[in-house]
Amino acid sequence: YCVGLFYRRQGVLQKAIPMLERSLALAQSADIPIQFPQAASLLSAAYALAGRAAEALPLLDQMLERLATGRRMLLHALVLTELSEACLLVGRVDEASALAARLLELSHTHTGHGYQAHAYRLFGEVARRREPTNIAQAATHYRQALALAEAVGMRPLQAHCHLGLGTLFGGWRIVK
């Protein structure tokens, strides 16, 4: 799943998906339940990014049920990040927001500024995708994420924040 994560984060889905499918299959066939959440959450996000919602949804639902038990898991912050992203991509904005809130709470006590930055970017995406769009709130969250990402050197996340801000303001003319 680590190689799949690498390709998924780069957006090279044609390499990420087979790696993540193999990882999920190995976790299931070798009965390694500790690896299942990472592989399933990453694969659901990769499927959603690839426009394969029909394949993403069963994994997503299975993982949301698993999270509902309240049990902590290995790389919990990674799982929350990927599931929130997948929810956004399949149009489940409220669930994405709830997962981002859990990620932010977890990042304050366990994982630090990197996942805080991810949580704020996800909140920016949520605010941007809600109807009606809350432009001010989205911009604030993107900027919070950007500041944290810059502080810890997370350049790909910085790029996603800039993309979010650009998308947010792309249809607006700023008058001075």
Image (spheres, rainbow, N blue to C red):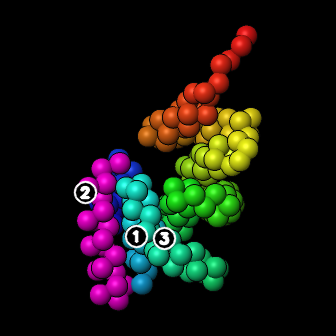
- Estimate the spatial distance between the alpha carbons at disc 3 and disc 2, rounded to whole Å: 20 Å
Residue visible at 35% across and 47% down in the picture: 10
User: SS at mark 1?
Assistant: helix
- Rendered image quadrant of residue 97: bottom right
User: SS at mark 3?
Assistant: helix
Name the kind of residue labelled 3 in the image: Leu
Q: Look at mark 1 in the image and give the residue it sits on.
A: 55
| Residue 88 can be seen, yes or no | yes
Name the kind of residue labelled 1 in the image: Glu
Q: Nearer the viewer, residue 146 or 68?
A: 68
Q: Look at mark 3 in the image and give the residue it sits on.
A: 57
| Residue 103 can be seen, yes or no | no
Few, some or many residues within 10 Å of mark 2 (<14, 14–19, 20+): some
Q: Range of the magenta residues?
A: 11-32
- Rendered image quadrant of residue 3: bottom left
Residue visible at 53% across and 75% down in the picture: 61
Check contact, mark 1 vs mark 3: CB within 8 A.
yes
- Estimate the spatial distance between the alpha carbons at disc 2 and disc 1, rounded to whole Å: 17 Å
